[in-house]
Image: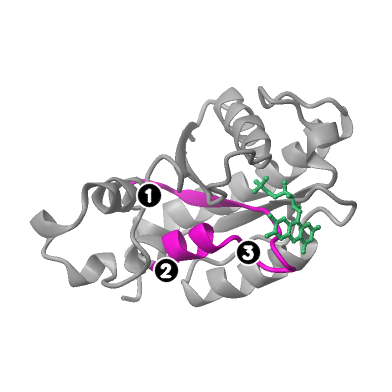
Amino acid sequence: MALTFSILYGSVREKRQGIRAVKFIQKQVEARGHKAIVLDAKELPLPFLDKMYKEFDEADAPENMKTIANALNGSDAFIVVTGEYNHSIPPALKNMLDHFQKEYFFKPSGIAAYSAGQFGGMRAAVHVRAILAELATPSIPTMASYPKIQKVLDENGEAIEEYFIKSTNKFLDELEWYAEALKRQRTEGTPY
Ligand SMILES: Cc1cc2nc3c(=O)[nH]c(=O)nc-3n(C[C@H](O)[C@H](O)[C@H](O)COP(=O)(O)O)c2cc1C
């Protein structure tokens, strides 16, 4: 079943490294015959949260907010790519996530974390899991993790170390399974 995945990424730093993971995951998703939409907070900046998307009349919402809402609405699953800033999630990623609500409902998500150091962003990843639960997009058990990202993925999103192809495939196998299952079930209706 062909699916659509939104990949959410929220580092807006000039020398950001996480874009390597975004490119890598995008290629892996597309290689499986799916559509991958990258929602990059640097390319699609939003203001610090004042009004959520649902609080705007549709025509009045900022263009980037509409673009992101349409992508989330059209997606079967979300992949949240998070770096780790002071043991938590990058602010622009949290800001992007917080603008939306019903766009996430009854669709699964997967967490892909990375860091410059050896822990692979895991302390931020557990925060992301709590946030996604509150947004009503249940996150799958397996997480993708890229420790020492600058050494294991190159600038074009190719794996330098073979292991990360294998581990990302396991992560995507699982997310694909949940995405197909919930897509099928949504055709039967949703509780709200
Ligand atoms: C403000 C800030 C805080 C950071 N805090 C952590 C941290 O708590 N743990 C960690 O492993 N790396 C930390 N780092 C290093 C990041 O893992 C590394 O800079 C990474 O490349 C950040 O992602 P980005 O390049 O996509 O922005 C921090 C970096 C910044 C800029």
Compared to residue 17, the image places residue 162 above or below, namely: above
Q: Name which residue type carries label 2.
A: Asp
Confirm whether the magenta stretch covers residue 87.
Answer: yes
Compare residues 97 and 43 and report the one nearer the observer: 43
Dot 3 or dot 2: first in sequence order is 3
In what quadrant does ligand 1 lie? bottom right
Q: Position of residue 79 (x, y in %)?
A: 57, 49
**Of callouts 3 and 1, the N-terminal one:** 1
Which residue appears at 66% of the width and 31% of the height?
24
Looking at the picture, how far across and down is residue 165, in whole percent?
A: 79, 31
Color style of the picture:
one colour
Determine whether label 3 and label 2 are within 8 Å by CB: no
What span is colored magenta in the figure? 74-98
Residue 166, image x, y percentages? 82, 34
Q: Which residue is mark 3?
A: 89
Residue assigned mark 1: 45
Tell me if residue 67 comes above or below residue 191 in the rendering.
above
Q: Secondary structure at mark 3?
A: loop
Residue at the image position 43 percent from the left and 52 percent from the top: 184
Name the residue at 60% across, 23% down.
Answer: 31
Nearer to me, 100 or 184: 100
Asked whether disc 1 touches disc 2, contact meaning CB atoms under 8 Å apart, the reply is no
Above-or-below relation of 166 to 147: above
